[in-house]
Image (cartoon, rainbow, N blue to C red):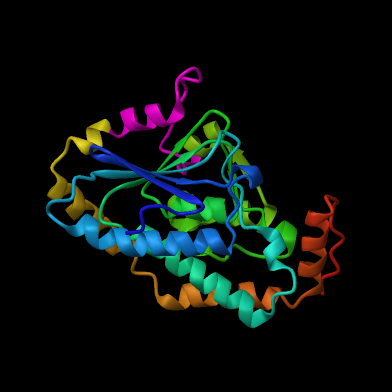
Amino acid sequence: MRKSFEHLIWEVEGQVAVLTINRPEVLNALNADVLEELDEWSTQIHPKLEQSTNPIRCIILQGAGSKAFVAGADIKEFKGKTKVEAQAISTRGQRIFGQIEQLPVPTVALVEGYALGGGAELAIACDFRLAAPNAIIGFPEVKLGLIPGFGGTVRLPRIIGYANAMEWMTTAKTVTAKQGVDVGIFNAILEQENEDMLDQAKKWITPLCSMAPLAIKSVIFAMKSQHNTYSTQFFEKEASLFGTLFETLDFEEGVNAFLEKRNPGFLNK
C-alpha cells in the first residue's frame, strides 16, 4: 500500500489503526481527489486485513481538526456536471463506501463537529459511530435540490428506521450527539471534553480489541450478510435519481444559493 497520501493519514499503533481525512481548511470535504485516495486505500487494505498475521483489530476513521468529521461533498465540483457524469459520481461513491463497509475488521467513525451529506454517508458505512459533544449529523441534500447519492437512502433506514430516515432526508434535519444516541445512529457520546477524543475512542474500543479476532470477523460477516442483501437495484435507483436531478433548475438554484450563502428559491422545475 502507498506509504503516504495527499489527503489521508494512515497510522497503525498496535491493534488499532486510524485513518484521518486531512482537509481541515475545507472541513474535510470530499472532493474527487479524496475519493480517489479512499478508493485506493480501501482496495489495498482489504486483503491485508484478511491475512492471519494482520495485527489490526479495529480501524477508526476521523476528520482532521475538531470542526468536522466530513462536512459533505465539495459542492463546487458539482457545477456543470451532466446527468451521466453525476450518475457516475454517485455510483463511484457507492462503490467506495461499500468497500469500506465490507472491511473484515470493525470500523468506527469518530465524529467531531459536522458529519453532513457525504460525510454522514461515510459515517453510516462504518460499523460504529462515536460522537464528540459537538457532533452534528444530517443529510441536507434536498437543500441543494439533490438526494443522498453515496448509499444514504439505502443504509440510513436500516440504522434509524424508515420513518426517522424519511424525516431526516426530506426535511434536511440535523441532530446533535444526544439526539443521535437516542435514535441509534451514534453508539455513544465521548463526554470528557478535557480529554483527547481519539484517546477516548481508543478506550471505547478496548473491549472489542480484546475479543477473539476470528469470532469478531465471523460476527461481522454474519451480520453484514443479512444487512447487505440489498438488491443492486436500490443503489442503481439512487444513482439514477441523483443524476437526473442534476438536469433540474432546482439543482442549479440550490447549488448557486449554497455557494452564494443565501436561501434558495426553488421553482419545482
**In this picture, which residue range is highlighted in magenta?**
183-205
The reply, left or right, for residue 242 in relation to residue 207 is right
Camera sees residue 161 = no
Residue depicted at x 49% and y 64%: 36
Q: Quadrant of the C terminus?
A: bottom right
In this view, the residue farthest toward the top is 194
The reply, left or right, for residue 47 in relation to residue 41 is left
Residue depicted at x 62% and y 56%: 169
- Pinpoint residue 91: horizontal percent, then vertical percent: 51, 73
Q: Nearer the viewer, residue 5 or 220?
A: 5
Residue 138 lies in the magenta stretch: no
Q: What is the total number of numbered labels drawn onto the structure image?
A: 0
Residue depicted at x 48% and y 57%: 157
- Pinpoint residue 249: horizontal percent, then vertical percent: 82, 73
Considering only vertical position in the picture, is 66 above or below 88?
Answer: above
The reply, left or right, for residue 258 in relation to residue 69 is right
Q: Nearer the viewer, residue 14 or 112?
A: 14
Considering only vertical position in the picture, is 94 above or below 10?
Answer: below
- Pinpoint residue 233: horizontal percent, then vertical percent: 46, 78
- Pinpoint residue 243: horizontal percent, then vertical percent: 64, 76
